[in-house]
Image (cartoon, helix red, strand yellow):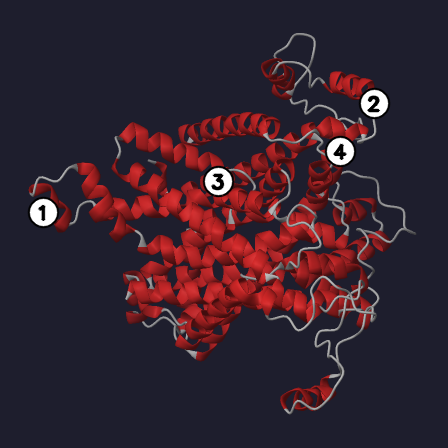
Amino acid sequence: MSDSAQIETAMLDLDRQDHAARPVPDLLFRLGGLIVLASLVLMVAGPWLTPFDIGRPSDDIMLPPPDLLAVPHLLLQVVTRAPHDPIHWFGTDSAGLDVFSRVLAAPRADVTIAVGANLFSLVVGSLIGLFAGTARPWLANLTMRLSDLVQAFPVFITGMILVTLAGRSNSTIVVTLALLYTPIYVRLTRSEVLTQRNRGFIDAARALGKNEAAIALRHVLPNALAPAMIQASVTIGFAILMTAGLSFVGAGVRPPTPEWGLMIAAGADGIVQAEWWPSVFPGIAISITVFGYAAFGNGLERRHAR
Amino acid sequence: MLSFIGRRLLTAGVQLIGLALVVFFAIRLLPADPVARLVGLNASPDAYQSSKHSLGLDRPLLVQLGAYLGVTPGSSGLLEGDLGRSWVTGDPITKEIRRTLPVTLELITSSFVLAFIVSVPLGMLCALRPGGVADKVTFSYSLFAGSQPEFWWGLLFIYLFFAVLGWAPPPLGRLDPMLTPPPAVTGFITVDSLLAGNMATFRDGVHHLMLPVLTKVFVLSGPIVKMVRQNMVRVLASDYVLYDQACGLKPRRIAVIALKNALVPALTLLGVLYGYILGGAVLIETVFSLGGIGQYAVRSVLAFDYPAIQAVVLVIAMISLFVYLTLDVVHAMLDARLRA
């Protein structure tokens, strides 16, 4: 068993036990929520908001970003609409592409993949989890052992293998991540189903003569979904990390798609020559985004526990 | 105790066999053409066919499986511990893994130990006054560190410590190319240097490990701090701690007593974490060109080198399961309730 999200799951379990003493400032939760919202807006609209064409290089190759001291002056020019040259806020890369525009456009790839994969595994995983929580013991056991088997694969390397051999495309990444993350949701939903199953309203439904399948779908599942939804916020962050990582080693999104991991990889050679900007800015974007999802998930979890 | 270990070994064995079968079939069912990748797109149909034949890919799937497992007479296979030969280099994969695996193990084991040493006091600091300023700051830090792209932090550290400050060596391997590596005994550069009494290579090896380990420690400290904190909070709320307080023991003394009990349940989680970073060493090795099993995996996957891919997945899963099992056994020895 080797999976960061699984560690997260184990930790959420621990969290639940000491929520009274949780110290996360409310600030972190709100900050996380804002970041999540911004990433979703960019996922939808990012490519339309870019100041430069993300595919057409300018003549300035490896142009550094403007000096920090010059930024207020440049901002003033933009705000007052004074005539000025187009500004490359984050500089340009070795092909002459505007780094700022590409950082803005990248969530279309990264966030879409991460959200898509998690929706996929949330739906499939919680249905399997419901099944494993209500089926006959031997069937439930078999399901859980299969889920264990999937979790025994080293996540990153398996991701690399599946994406590369299935043909690198955004949809294969979504399916691969969904497959790797499904066991997390199976496990979470199942344990929640097991506790929900014995509650009074379930007995009441049974006494009313409803059949077991209807009870499971209509009454147990909706009440057992909360932990899985909270987990999704954390796992979406990890899926963004994984997408960027896969692309970084050449086993993910194909160039020239604007994608954070690809941008970091393309700028990596410049790092040793102190040309930092093509790699550093997309990295900051990943750093902030994934932290946002983690903080938001943590806050949600704390609220749920109260 | 023995039956506990036996049962766990059996489960692990079944899991590994299942894993081997799944990997074998999965990579053959996916729509990739390893022959075309090997001979190139301009190869003649004859060359394509002969290459396909020499790789054994023209045989039925079950015959290929038999050869892989080594049940076909006259060939050795997985069941005898033979991982086959790489399609790219033609070398035995066992040899290639013996060369690359220690690199990864050296990196992650040292990172793991250091991260633990750094994180335990931090986690305790949080737990002693939950909700205090130190707790809030450390908790935010661990949330942040636990959600970072490590390959990017590696590059950032290279920029800072190599390109700007000049403190670190260039990120090109484990040792200065001018130095002769010590004779390989364990495969760990640092340990081998000490065994050979070669302080120059030892210092250089440590120097080259500095940045990758720093990156790993930073990323790893996030989850470990969180884990220590949560276990400590729970233990500190227990009755015997209350009793210790009633007896008038000093807080520091109580913290030491509680730490032992807080760390035991953490063992299992540490096992999971170790397996996770073993599989995730790919990125950091790529950034620093360390040539460990992670980079070997990237090379094999991108070249469609099926035998090597199968071997890497199996070896990494095996080590993870072994670490997991060992920690479970230690856990059971420390906590009699688990032995049932």
Estimate the spatial distance between the alpha carbons at disc 1 and disc 4, rounded to whole Å: 63 Å
Residue B109: in sight, yes or no? Answer: no
State the residue at coordinates (40%, 28%): B3
Relative to A99, say whether A188 is above or below.
above
Residue A110: x and y in percent read: 57, 57
Residue B102: x and y in percent read: 71, 42
Residue B86: x and y in percent read: 75, 28
Residue A151 circle label: 3
User: Residue B217 occupies which quadrant of the picture?
Assistant: bottom right
**Disc 2 residue type (three-letter):** Ser
**Disc 3 residue type (three-letter):** Gln
Estimate the spatial distance between the alpha carbons at disc 3 and disc 1, rounded to whole Å: 37 Å
Estimate the spatial distance between the alpha carbons at disc 3 and disc 2, rounded to whole Å: 42 Å
User: Which one is in front in this view, the residue at disc 1 or the one at disc 4?
Assistant: 1
Left/right placement of residue B94 relative to residue A121 reads: right
**Disc 1 residue type (three-letter):** Ala
User: Which one is in front in this view, the residue at disc 3 or the one at disc 4?
Assistant: 3
Left/right placement of residue A140 relative to residue B116 reads: left
Q: Chain of mark 4?
A: B
Crowd rating for badge 2 (residues with CA inside 10 Å; few <14, some 14–19, many 20+): few
Question: Which residue, given by chain and number where applicable, does mark 1 sit on?
Answer: A204
Residue B280: in sight, yes or no? Answer: yes
Question: Which residue, given by chain and number where applicable, does mark 2 sit on?
Answer: B44
User: Which one is in front in this view, the residue at disc 2 or the one at disc 1?
Assistant: 2
